[in-house]
């Protein structure tokens, strides 16, 4: 049971981490203008004056963001 929970967590964590790195590396734009944190109760953060987006997961939940158009 614990092994399956860990597998699911890793399946979610790895793509989210890669997405964070790609977003951060692809542009030095102000993410405060380009993205909106839509859910996560403080687990997603914009750091370095809007240059870095850090979504995170825990045992119970995750975080989400959307693109401003």
Image (cartoon, rainbow, N blue to C red):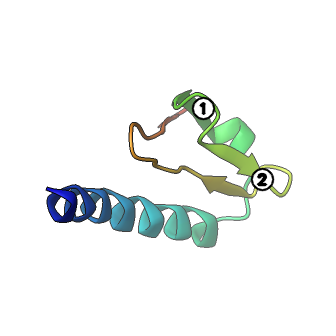
Which class describes the residues within 10 Å of circle 2: few (<14), some (14-19), or many (20+)? few
What residue do we see at 60% from left, 42% from top? 44
What residue do we see at 21% from left, 59% from top? 2
Q: Is residue 2 left or right of residue 24?
A: left
Q: Is residue 17 above or below residue 47?
A: below
- Residue at the far front in the pictured view: 1
Residue under numbered circle 2:
47
The quadrant the N terminus occupies is bottom left
Residue 51 drawn at (x, y percent): 75, 58
Q: Quadrant of residue 68?
A: top right
What residue do we see at 65% from left, 65% from top? 27
Q: Is residue 14 left or right of residue 66?
A: left
> 58 or 30: which is nearer to us?
58
Cα–Cα span, label 1 and label 2: 13 Å
Residue 58 drawn at (x, y percent): 46, 47
- Circle number at residue 36: 1
Q: Secondary structure at mark 1?
A: strand
């Amino acid at each position: 049971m614990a092994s399956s929970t860990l597998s699911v967590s890793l399946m979610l964590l790895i793509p989210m981490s890669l997405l964070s790195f790609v977003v951060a590396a692809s542009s030095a734009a102000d993410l405060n203008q380009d993205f909106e944190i839509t859910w996560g109760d403080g687990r997603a953060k914009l750091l370095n004056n809007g240059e870095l987006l850090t979504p995170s997961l825990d045992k119970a939940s995750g975080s989400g963001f959307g693109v401003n158009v």
